[in-house]
Amino acid sequence: MKKWLIFFCTLLIAATAHSKEGYYDGAAEWKDFKTFVQQQQQEDETLGLSYMISGGVATIGGVYGYYAAEDIFSRGMFAITSTLGIAAIGLGASYYWTGNEYDSFYYALEGSKLTLAERNQVLERYLEKEKHERENRRWIRVATHALIAAVNFYSASRETNGDARAIFMFLGGTNAILAVTYAF
């Protein structure tokens, strides 16, 4: 029972570990875009802090659990938890200190001498290109996680050690969930 509890807790952390992506899908109007970017900057700071705090808790809990656990499966799960915790701290720091993909574009145009009509025109072209690139990134993530899942499921099918097989199944399942998550 203890193994499954650890497994599902770690799976929950892993499934929610991928980054939140706030995309602008509004009209190509500078005023609306400016409001969105300013709100997004506040959300990025809050999100960054929450990732860093929860990542710290997961890291500490993972390290403590690793040394307290006796069986290989539990130790593996705690090691994964602490690794994901460190990744969450890095992701949070990125959100907090660097913001999102729109910040640099916004500041470049906001500080320019372009007219409002020119800003709207540039914004429209930028948003068209960004939408296409975002779709490409999404499918690359789906394919990457699906391939990782397939490799781990294959390794699990070939593994004779039950504990190692469980870890491969866990990694395969986690990446399968991430692939499905990115597909939508």
Image: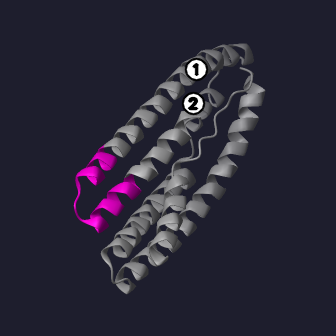
Residue 141 x/y as whole percent: 44, 36
Tell me the residue that label 2 is attached to.
Answer: 105
Residue, x 76% and y 36% (percent of image)?
35
- Foreground disc of the pair 2, 1: 1
Spatial separation of the CA atoms under disc 2 and disc 1: 9 Å
Q: Quadrant of the C terminus?
A: top right
Q: Judge by depth and name the residue closer to the eye, 164 or 20.
A: 164
The span picked out in magenta is 151-171
Give me the residue at 48% from left, 62% from top: 89
Residue furthest to the bottom = 68
Asked which quadrant contains residue 140, the reply is top left
Say if 115 sits above or below 52 in the image.
above
| Residue 156 falls inside the magenta stretch | yes
Q: Are marks 2 and 1 in contact (CB under 8 Å)?
A: yes
Residue 90 appears at what percent x and percent y? 45, 58
The spot of residue 58 in percent (x, y) is 49, 71
